[in-house]
Image: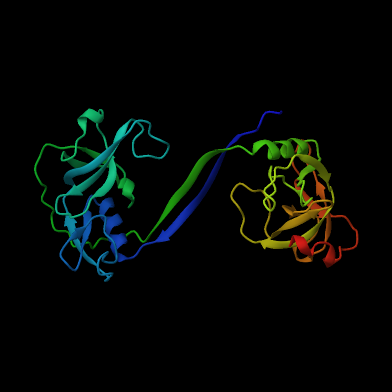
Amino acid sequence: MPEVLKAPLVVEFPFTRSLGPVQSAFLTGLRERVVLGVRTTDGRTLVPPVEYDPVTADEIHDLVEVAPTGTVTTWAWNHEPRRGQPLDTPFAWVLVRLDGADTALLHALDAPGPDAVRTGMRVRVRWAPERSGAITDIACFEPYDGGPGEPAGHDGRFENPVTGIVAAARLDYVYSPGRAQTAYIENLAERRTVGERCPSCRKVYVPPRGACPTCGLATSEQVEVGPRGTVTTYCIVNIKAKNLDIDVPYVYAHIALDGAGLALHGRIGGIPYDEVRMGLRVEPVWTEGGRHPDHYRPTGEPDADYETYKEML
């Protein structure tokens, strides 16, 4: 049996969010080394602040400054920090109830080891040397021997308030396509498209899944399909993807390869985007050294009759 493939993959995108007055004041305050909470209708102070009372659902906006010192309420030791975490050496994740607050804030505690951390220990904010209006303006917490701090009573009004944030969302993972798709990928490298047939319903799956999702039976009979196929449906892409050297607009389509029982997706090229249509007959275009088709182009054949591909829409 051939070796099953695996590859490290990354899903990454910027998440942009506008801020209301409460969150704007909180993040702007961090930029100015001020920690703000919000007072609820029953007199509690929530840090980090929220815009609606979690008990009554009333809108709340009464900002209250709390101290940059506090008490650890619970914690967990992080032996192996990951990329993007607050510290690059082992540290503790802690929930800290800041002096003047009734709820706890999650952040990192810089400590020499787990034996140096305990519930009830006193800590204080270590501010980042450069601050921009983000939770990372608190670099971390650090042990503190003093008593409760005294906030200055800031009213939450600042010059040049932060009105929005952009957070980079990222997921790193290792993907293994399994036996069936490993064979599919290796055949693509030889410019062959090979699916697998269900022994019961006889449908040919491309790409193969290793089992028929309808019958629940394992698939092992390999069937070469295509290379030509029919556009069953499509969409016009108008937003340019990062690191993708393709001008917009372009067309991405579901393509039913000849002999396949399931449509796969691919980009359509060699034709103006507004001339792509259902039933268009296409063929793969390979680049030199490419391990999969770069795109599909029209074959010049007459369009396929709708009855021949309607079951694969």
**Relative side of 75 to 294, left or right:** left
**Relative side of 3 to 89, left or right:** right
> What colour scheme does the image use?
rainbow
Q: Position of residue 7 (x, y in %)?
A: 60, 35
**Relative side of 127 to 243, left or right:** left
Q: Quadrant of residue 297 in the image?
A: bottom right
Quadrant of the image for the N terminus? top right
List the single residue furthest toward the bottom: 58
Q: Position of residue 120 (x, y in %)?
A: 15, 40
| Residue 139 seen anywhere in this rendered image of the structure | no
Q: Position of residue 306 (x, y in %)?
A: 83, 67
| Residue 62 seen anywhere in this rendered image of the structure | yes
**Relative side of 166 to 185, left or right:** left
List the single residue furthest toward the right: 301
Quadrant of the image for the C terminus? bottom right
Q: Position of residue 130 (x, y in %)?
A: 31, 44
Is the residue 42 above or below the residue 189 in the image? Answer: below
Q: Nearer the viewer, residue 106 or 6?
A: 6
Count of marks placed on residues: 0
Residue depicted at 65% across the width and 37% down the height: 178
Q: Nearer the viewer, residue 106 or 3?
A: 3
Is the residue 274 above or below the residue 71 in the image? Answer: below
List the single residue furthest toward the left: 147
